[in-house]
Amino acid sequence: MPDIVASHADPGDHAHHPALQHHFQTLEQQQEASTLGMWIFLVTEVMFFGGLLMAYLVYRVWYPLAWSEGSLELDIRLGAFNTVVLIGSSLTMALAVRSAQTGAQKATVRWLLLTMALGLTFLVVKFFEYREKYLLHHIPGPNFQFEGPEAPHVQIFLSLYFGLTGLHALHMIVGFSILAVITWMAHRRRFSPEWHTPVELSGLYWHFVDIVWIFLFPLLYLVDRAHHLS
Amino acid sequence: MTTTVLPRVNYLNVRHGVASWLLTKDHKRIGIMYLVVVTIAFFLGGLFATGVRIELTTPQGDFVSADTYNRLFTMHGVFMVFFVLVPVVPAVLGNFVLPLMIGAKDVAFPRLNLLSWYVFVFGFIFTITAMVTGGVDTGWTFYTPYSSSASNSNVMLTGIGVFITGFSSILTGLNFMVTIHRMRAPGLTWFRLPLFVWALYATALVMILATPIIAITIGMMALERALGFGIFDPRLGGDPVLFQHLFWFYSHPAVYIMILPPMGVISEVIACFSRKNVFGYSFVAFSSLAIAVFGFLVWAHHLFVAGISPYSAMVFSFLSFAVAIPSAVKVFNWTATLYQGAIWWRAPMLWVFGFIGLFLIGGLTGLFLASLGLDVHLHDTYFVVAHFHYIMVGGAVMGFFAGLHYWWPKMTGRMYPNWAATTAALLVFFGFNLTFFPQFILGYLGMPRRYHAYSEEFQVLNVLSSAGASILAVGYTLIASYLVFSLFRGQAAGANPWRATGLEWKTESPPIPDNFTETPIVNEGAYKYSEREIEVA
């Protein structure tokens, strides 16, 4: 009996789509499953950052002065610039998804490349911020140097700063790599209005990483500056 | 009895060679691959437990040094918790039967499923490397500041191993959740699902929401240890108790990752071997979800003596009592299922009875520990050790063996000798009680855990405990022997040796690669046992 190996029960229109995996009945089912999977993955990511943010919250309540002092050490202009860059990259990513939906293949590639360029800009700026911290001995650890009575608590602030932004930067690097693959696939005309799930899912991921930054920027850069300026 | 022929083409013989296993996307093969790794981890964990029990036969610390002893119980805990108890039912049995139970060809993301296995093995290799290069001595809880600044053992390697393994758990949970949402056969509505599927769904919820927290917490601990970051360091004003909060925010729900899937197994087996529908189906289903939700709200009962506020301690004490309600719902409903059933005394059912009895003791002693005053006396004594072993071994491991004996004919197509399985179930039950019941008394009398030497007055009970452990070892070895024997010489099982209902029994044993020749259409619930079906055996 040859039908033991595989039998697609209903050979509908979609059953022959090359992207349809054998264990799904229809392309819709496959897309719904993938999208749900991505959303659940993002939930786990929220919890992942949540652990660090919990530590942030506890210590911010305990050491408000150190939070304010530590925050003043961060370069608000670079942080603001990066915020704009990332929000811009979310726009270009959304446009890339839109182009994939309408089947505008060349535009998809263009928007994806622009998104990657903006992501790279963010990482380069972040590198220079880290470099400055390194030169000033503001990286927590044995070589940490900071003047003032709040120095140990500022070290906790900076530990969380590096923990949070480092984890975020890691996500940016992963996102950049994913986009590189997606761009290549788009260039090879693998996507169509019927099937462009990878573009949509990497879009979801990219927006999530942006949103994390939109929380991190005020939490880290904008702590009680008025208090110090007055 | 004549041996019927195994199906000609099945998932085991459709392809041959090592590569066909290592590159497989078949959930059934991946389940078997998990079983192999988990068995190795179980053996290693058992080896360390043997060391612990040998040391504790005499009051003096004479078999190993205090330092080695610390490593023994730590490695026992790390292997058993992260590499046995967490994956054993979801990743082995869940992987194998979930798609079969819902009439699907596979889980939603087969490639991701294989990746989970590789991630698991990768984390396992890290932890084994940590073990062979000297081990780790922090206890499986990795409490700071000892782990982050004092311990000179392999905390980093073990931490990385556990961190990596966590992602395997997350990906499995994600995969199961999407599978249950999107891959059910036509007509298989939520309230027709087998209760094992409900239990796996609740487990997936905990895996997804809790596991990332342990990953990031161990990450913070590692940053502190490796680079001198200060997040939990009291010298900088950091709070080690925060580590405990974050750690138990995962590790308490993790107890429910370990116990919920075996509870699901019990519901399956008890229905089949009482020839009755599970009493109060929807109560059992929702109690799984309730346990998952309550499980997130009780973590600080591990911190009653860590200096937390008495008011929050009261709240956590109350919530810990509350989690007993859905657990009790399950036990009552299983018992009610037995009532007027036609109980069939075969090996899987013996494990179920073992589970119910031991889980009951484990659960009720949990209430002792949830009460604030008593916990001050019992905290960090052998009472706690006995309590969680009754849940984790008496509950989770017994439940796993119930499931393994129930689905083994489906997984391999072959039966094991029932007399051997009966003997093993009895040996493990008696061995287990002999090992751990004395520990309740020891703890109540005040013997602290995690020391390699103790006062002479505790020796008799400790010798009993070690004697019980050796019976346990014989029981587990027996299981391994007759299961391996059955692989080669076992009688062919046929599609449905237990005459069970449920979709997984409607296909051949072992199942064909695509599970079903055509997608089943479901128009009834999972349990369709006639109430008076006495004549089965």
Image: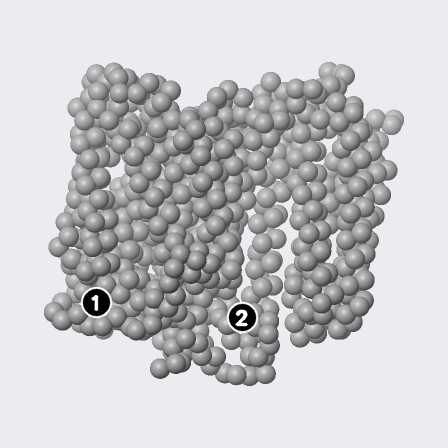
In-image side of B433 versus A70 (left or right): left
Image quarter of residue A101: bottom right
Q: Is residue A212 left or right of residue B356?
A: right
x%, y% of residue A85? 82, 48
Q: Is residue B247 above or below residue A143?
A: below
Q: Percent x, y for residue A77?
A: 86, 38
Q: Nearer the viewer, residue B172 or B534?
A: B172
Residue placed furthest toward the front: B17
Amino acid marked by disc 2: Gln
Q: CB of mark 1 within 8 Å of CB of mark 2? A: no
User: Is B358 rendered above or below residue B21?
Assistant: above
Among the 4 quarters of the image, the one containing residue A55: top right
Callout 2: residue from which chain? A
Residue type at mark 1 is Ala
| Residue at image location 71% in from the left, 56% down from the top | A179
Kindly identify which numbered label has been placed on residue A21: 2
Identified at 79% across, 45% down, the residue is A122
Determine which of the numbered discs, if any, sits on residue B492 in the image.
1
Q: Chain of mark 1?
A: B
